[in-house]
Amino acid sequence: MHENPALDAYETGDMDLEERQALRRVAGLSTELQDISEVEYRQLRLERVVLVGVWTSGTVEDAENSLLELKLLAETAGSEVLDGLIQRRQKPDPATYIGSGKALELRDVVESTAADTVICDGELTPGQLRQLEETVKVKVIDRTALILDIFAQHAKSREGKAQVELAQLQYLLPRLRGWGGNLSRQVGGRAAGGVGIGGRGPGETKIELDRRRIRERMAKLRRQIRGMSTSRDTMRYQRQRREVPAVAIAGYTNAGKSSLLNRVTGAGVLVEDALFATLDPTVRRARTPEGRLFTIADTVGFVRHLPHQLVEAFRSTLEEVADADLILHVVDGSHPDPEGQLAAVREVFADIEGASAIPEIVVINKADLADQDVIDRILRRERDSIVVSARTGKGIPELMALIEQELPRLDHEVSLLVPYDRGDLISRAHKEGEVLSVEHVGDGTILHARVLPSLSQELERVGKPVERVS
């Protein structure tokens, strides 16, 4: 920990945190329309909510953990959770998700608690969404819409905002609603019920126009994201060209990834006890205990059933994981189901081409809060794992030593006389390699170091082997 309190405050992202907390939803100020069936573009103004989940497999503890996570998501979005219900079914009801009888019971719960929103722990079809809303008479959203709303609140960069908007539009398109049958179009003649001349409407309905506009907007966003990812690709190419090893921090949301990045590099990334607190990837430089330079990137957090729209929209961001030489897979040791977190993250890895083949270190974080039996259980299951606390600093030196051990080996050892006018190569050897010894003589600098192949080639072009020096 730094001795300067001001620097410590910066390293927790206090400035960003203060800015985010300066704008919060105020409960009880909703102006939601009474007849939600007439709402065409429904923004998520979550306030007083009831949670409902369908338990199809696993233990009751698994079902309760899933609903607890939904509660944390709802609170992160700015809502007050009033009640939570779980129904045991073989599979969700295709009409109302929980069945018509349970939907009526849910309506009674909503009325008794004066809730204005129901959140379902799963992704609902457009038909399920509509019919459940018609039964409970309040707004109904699913887990996917909730996560998209949180992403929309937390996105800061231009690229992040574009990625979230694209994911929202992909989700909205099949669920778009019109304003009722009175806007139906394109009728006429006796075959159309005798409406006759003058009764024909325009060729496209309002909802068809909206769908076309959404598709055009999605195409534009995809072009923008491709353009914005060019700068990221350029920076990544520069790092690869100079063969600076890359480490990616990945893991479940709220596992402590940003805290770990701040502890290792002093990056000053925002840290908040909330799900999906940071979305924009941050890349910083760091050094191993032996002084070797590498980059370390903080990536977006994952969650169970991460919406496929987000995986697709954030693909350019997730490429930081695919292009890494080493993945630090951070897991919250104090969580009720850390093994479930590990499995959920690896599911997302499977969707990222090449990510599953990258060496992985499981970093069990929050050791100061975790139960020792849980830590021991994970250590037995995961071959390459280490226990740390990003808050207290416990285990960080051991983690840095393990990173050094796992990074690509410096397999070219050189012993050369480098002219003084090529001091830039000596500097690169210090930054990118492992310098064993340096001696300054009349003609230049005698360098003995282990370096990567590209730097070795440049040194051999300008230097002289030490045994030839008279």
Image (cartoon, rainbow, N blue to C red):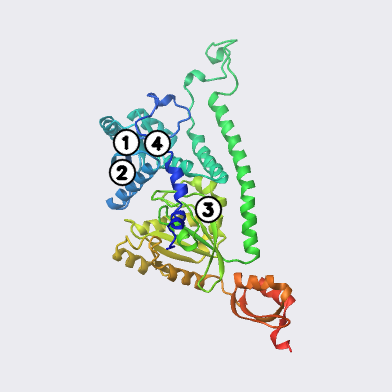
Which residue is the site of mark 3?
281
* Residue 49: image location, x then y, percent: 33, 36
Mark closer to the observer (3, 4):
4
Q: In whole angstroms, how far apart are the C-alphas of marks 3 and 4? A: 26 Å
Mark identifier at residue 23? none
Which residue is the site of mark 4?
25
Amino acid type of the residue tagged 4 in the rendering: Arg
Mark closer to the observer (2, 3):
3
In the image, what residue occupies the spot 44% across and 24% down? 38
Amino acid type of the residue tagged 2 in the rendering: Arg
In the image, what residue occupies the spot 34% across and 56% down? 335
Classify mark 3: helix, strand or loop: loop
Q: Earlier in the sequence, mark 1 or mark 3?
A: 1
Mark closer to the observer (1, 3):
3
Q: Earlier in the sequence, mark 3 or mark 4?
A: 4
Which residue is the site of mark 1?
99
Mark closer to the observer (2, 4):
4
Amino acid type of the residue tagged 1 in the rendering: Gly
Q: Earlier in the sequence, mark 2 or mark 1?
A: 2
* Residue 290: image location, x then y, percent: 53, 74
Amino acid type of the residue tagged 3 in the rendering: Pro
